[in-house]
Image (cartoon, helix red, strand yellow):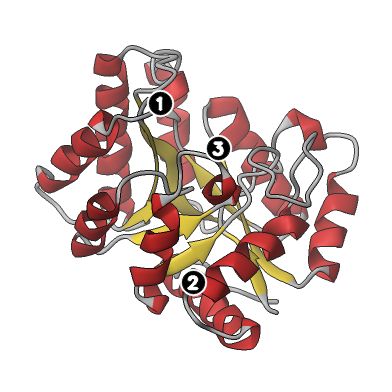
Amino acid sequence: MRLIDSHCHLNADRFDADVDLVVGAARLAGVERILVPGWDVASSERAIALVERLPWLDAAVGVHPHDAANVDDAGWDRIVDWAARDEVVAIGETGLDYDRVFSPVPDQLTNLRRNLRLAAATGKPAILHCRSAAGRRDAQDALLAELRGLGEPVRIVIHSYSGPVDYADAMLDLGAMISFSGLVFRSGEEASAEVAARTPRDRVLVETDSPFLAPPGAPRSRNAPEWVRITAAWLAERQHATGDDLGGTLVGNYDRTFSNRRRTD
């Protein structure tokens, strides 16, 4: 099965010692595309450095809601400069997190808005994280309100889907791509199965969110891009697709979503 990993933090320190081996194992598993997103200034810089060394990877730059209160104007200016680079195919990850609230909500909203403005200015998609506390949907509703209030079009990738079915329907109405990770296997995320079944095939992506969110069968200590095959197989079942059919679609969806990159592989 052809595979992609649309969200993989190979720029995390857990991969410092063996990132080349991890990437090689992903290649052997059939992974043809990997997007490495930043979550703050330093990680965005590391994503670019990794892609410069391994040019078949792609990078994204931006500020995660957890770090919304920690990036100053000078740091943001660096992200804006990096966003213009060809190897940077998206802005993010950004979004809202009302579960752990590591940054105050007003700071998260300010951060989200400037990331969305940067996505609009560059024409590159915004990679959006969205989490609410268990049993709640306030972050999803706030994110929808922000997107509906935009005065300019922004392409959207919903990273590591989490939320009720009608939230997915609303995001699809806004043109979003929906990406599924190992989170779909966790208790409390049962709605993701219905979302996966009803999302049009040309709007789905898969990811690992490595080194986090290991699916069943992957090492709990450190997820890696090769294990995206587990989530891809889960998605194929819900889409009633063969692995060959879905694999080709996933590669095509990735290339269409992150279309500004001039590929040489």
Q: Which mark is residue 261?
A: none
Label 3 Cα crowd, 10 Å radius (few <14 / some 14-19 / many 20+): many
Q: Is residue 227 left or right of residue 122?
A: right
* Residue nearest the viewer, comparing 156 with 173: 173
Dot 1 or dot 3, earlier in sequence: 3
Distance between the Cα atoms at labels 1 and 2? Answer: 31 Å
Circle 2 is placed at which residue position? 238
Q: Does residue 158 appear in the picture of this structure?
A: no
Q: Is residue 61 left or right of residue 52?
A: left
Q: Does residue 27 appear in the picture of this structure?
A: yes
Image position of 62 with respect to 109: above or below: below
* Residue nearest the viewer, comparing 69 with 211: 211
The residue lying at 34 percent from left, 70 percent from top is 198
Distance between the Cα atoms at labels 3 and 2? Answer: 30 Å
Label 2 Cα crowd, 10 Å radius (few <14 / some 14-19 / many 20+): some
Query: Residue 62 at what x, y percent from top left?
Result: 45, 36
Dot 1 or dot 2, earlier in sequence: 1
Circle 3 is placed at which residue position? 38
Circle 1 is placed at which residue position? 65
Mark 2: which amino acid?
Arg
Image position of 229 with respect to 182: above or below: below
Q: Quadrant of residue 194?
A: bottom left
* Residue nearest the viewer, comparing 163 with 116: 163
Secondary element under disc 3, as helix, strand or loop, is loop
Secondary element under disc 2, as helix, strand or loop, is helix
Which mark is in front, 1 or 2? 2
Q: Quadrant of residue 69?
A: top left
* Residue nearest the viewer, comparing 186 with 116: 186
The residue lying at 77 percent from left, 38 percent from top is 220
Image position of 30 with respect to 148: above or below: below
**Image quadrant in which the N terminus is located:** bottom right
